[in-house]
């Protein structure tokens, strides 16, 4: 272990998160991914950008304008030197965190010194896709929406593991782990309240770069604030219809949204920090992944975090900040209880989570790492945990230490 290099998160930025069909609806996915890269370049004039070893971005779709290797496209569109390569990672919901962890692994192994890592997703602009004909003169067409979830289902997969929708997996977790509707709604309300307080305090403004978005007529419109959060009460949440009647518990109010956004950060070795005049903010201590049954994909962070703690020697009580992606309140609560954390822990998603802020799939993990770093600095804490569940049954967890 002593021969490994340190990998540091330095400057990090993100776009505001847009609602489905909202302020980022007219921004192509590749242009969206380029925005935080351009911001990093503008904010760090002392960096020799030709020295960047890799651009690693997470993206879950890659079926539309985000095809042809989103990271490479974003690097070229951002104005980075053409010599800087790019690779796109897809671990669905955790793609952005996987990108950050992968960048750190390359630096710690001594195979890179300076990497831009992050993620992007335009769920609004995810295309409809059509299957190719399987016979001459075929007169039927199979069309699938690529915004979220299964498409072109393999019958063998369906027979062996099932192909429940994401909300159905949230329902499975609620039932299997006995998470009540009332507890889910209370968790969702806390997310909204904490996000509103963070917006009001200017916390998120410190990590956001203003986007010159476009309206339907192509006119520039400044976009500077996450637009998914909404005012809620327990009464209004309780009135929302369940997605799976008659005895379901998951609603639009206690689930994350379909959203657009991008985030990126500079990950650097100690030598690169010194050479390029960077400020190290957090040390990446490690990343771990794990698999769980697809029907309860939401509990993936439990074994991933346990594996991470075993590798790093950290205990759950050592983390001063926990950023847990809120795909659904049901799975978030099941994870917290599985890790021995309280439902309402102040240090868990202390500025709100995906239920309030939204969940642009490829971006979300990178946002967690960015926000966790930011929160460590604000609170003076030492260690942070970032973790997400992943469709098809996985979990990813990453540990940070404030510098």
Image (cartoon, helix red, strand yellow):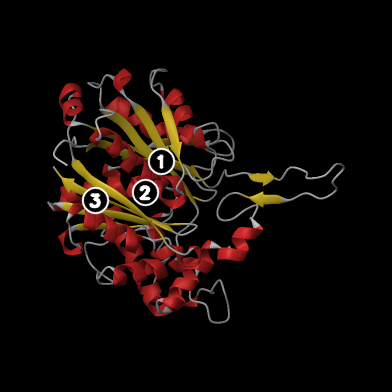
Give x and y (percent) for residue 329. 40, 68
Figure check: 210 above or below 52: below
Residue 351 appearing in the image: no
Q: Earlier in the sequence, mark 1 or mark 2?
A: 1
Please state, as top left, top right, bottom left or bottom right, where the C terminus lies in the image: top left
Whole-number angstrom distance, CA of label 1 to CA of label 3? 18 Å
Q: Residue at x 45, y 48 (%)?
A: 91
- What residue is disc 1 on? 119
Q: Is residue 142 left or right of residue 23?
A: right
Give x and y (percent) for residue 92. 47, 49
356 and 70: which is toward the camera: 70
Q: Residue at x 46, y 59 (%)?
A: 393
Quadrant of res 222: top left
- What residue is disc 3 on? 399
Please state, as top left, top right, bottom left or bottom right, where the N terminus lies in the image: top left
In this rendering, which labeled residue sits more in front, label 1 or label 3? 3
Give x and y (percent) for residue 13. 31, 38
Quadrant of res 75: top left
| Marks 3 and 2 in Cβ contact (< 8 Å) | no
Q: Earlier in the sequence, mark 1 or mark 3?
A: 1
- What residue is disc 2 on? 365
Q: Secondary structure at mark 1?
A: strand
Q: Residue at x 28, y 28 (%)?
A: 112
| Marks 1 and 2 in Cβ contact (< 8 Å) | yes
Residue 156 appearing in the image: yes
Quadrant of res 306: bottom left
Q: Residue at x 35, y 58 (%)?
A: 353
Q: Is residue 347 left or right of residue 171?
A: left
In this rendering, which labeled residue sits more in front, label 3 or label 2? 3
Figure check: 190 above or below 54: below
Please rate how many residues cluster around mark 1, counting C-alpha atoms within 10 Å: few if below 14, some from 14 to 19, many from 20.
many
Give x and y (percent) for residue 36. 37, 34
């Amino acid at each position: 272990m002593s021969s490994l290099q340190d990998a540091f998160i330095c400057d990090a930025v993100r776009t505001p998160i847009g609602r489905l069909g909202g302020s980022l609806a007219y921004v192509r996915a590749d242009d969206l991914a380029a925005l935080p890269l351009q911001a990093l370049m503008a904010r760090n004039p002392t960096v020799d950008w030709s020295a960047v070893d890799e651009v690693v971005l997470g993206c879950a779709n890659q079926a539309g304008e985000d095809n042809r290797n989103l990271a490479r496209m974003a690097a070229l569109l951002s104005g980075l030197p053409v010599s800087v390569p790019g690779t796109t990672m897809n671990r669905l919901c955790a793609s952005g965190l996987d990108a950050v962890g992968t960048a750190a692994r390359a630096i710690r192994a001594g195979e890179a010194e300076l990497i831009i890592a992050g993620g992007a997703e335009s769920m609004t602009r995810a295309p409809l896709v059509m299957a190719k004909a399987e016979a001459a003169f075929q007169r039927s067409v199979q069309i699938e929406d690529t915004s979220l979830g299964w498409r072109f289902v393999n019958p063998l997969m369906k027979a062996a593991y099932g192909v429940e929708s994401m909300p159905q997996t949230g329902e499975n977790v609620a039932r299997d782990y006995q998470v009540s509707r009332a507890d889910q709604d209370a968790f969702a309300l806390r997310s909204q309240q904490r996000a509103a307080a963070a917006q009001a305090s200017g916390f998120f403004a410190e990590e956001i770069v203003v986007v010159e978005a476009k309206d339907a007529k192509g006119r520039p419109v400044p976009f500077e604030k996450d637009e998914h959060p909404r005012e809620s009460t327990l009464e209004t949440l309780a009135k929302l219809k369940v997605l799976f009647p008659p005895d379901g518990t998951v609603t639009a109010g206690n689930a994350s949204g379909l959203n657009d956004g991008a985030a990126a950060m500079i990950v650097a070795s100690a030598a690169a920090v010194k050479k390029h005049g960077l400020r190290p903010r957090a040390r990446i201590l490690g990343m771990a992944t794990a698999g769980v049954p697809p029907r309860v994909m939401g509990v993936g962070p439990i074994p991933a975090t346990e594996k991470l703690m075993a590798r790093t020697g950290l205990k759950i009580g050592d983390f001063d900040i926990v950023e847990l992606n809120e795909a659904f309140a049901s799975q978030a609560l099941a994870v917290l209880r599985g890790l021995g954390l309280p439902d309402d822990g102040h240090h868990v998603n202390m500025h709100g989570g995906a239920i309030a802020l939204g969940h642009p799939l490829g971006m979300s993990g990178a946002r967690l790492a960015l926000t966790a770093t930011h929160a460590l600095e604000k609170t003076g804490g030492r260690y942070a945990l970032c973790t997400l569940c992943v469709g098809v049954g996985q979990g990813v967890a990453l540990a940070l230490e404030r510098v």
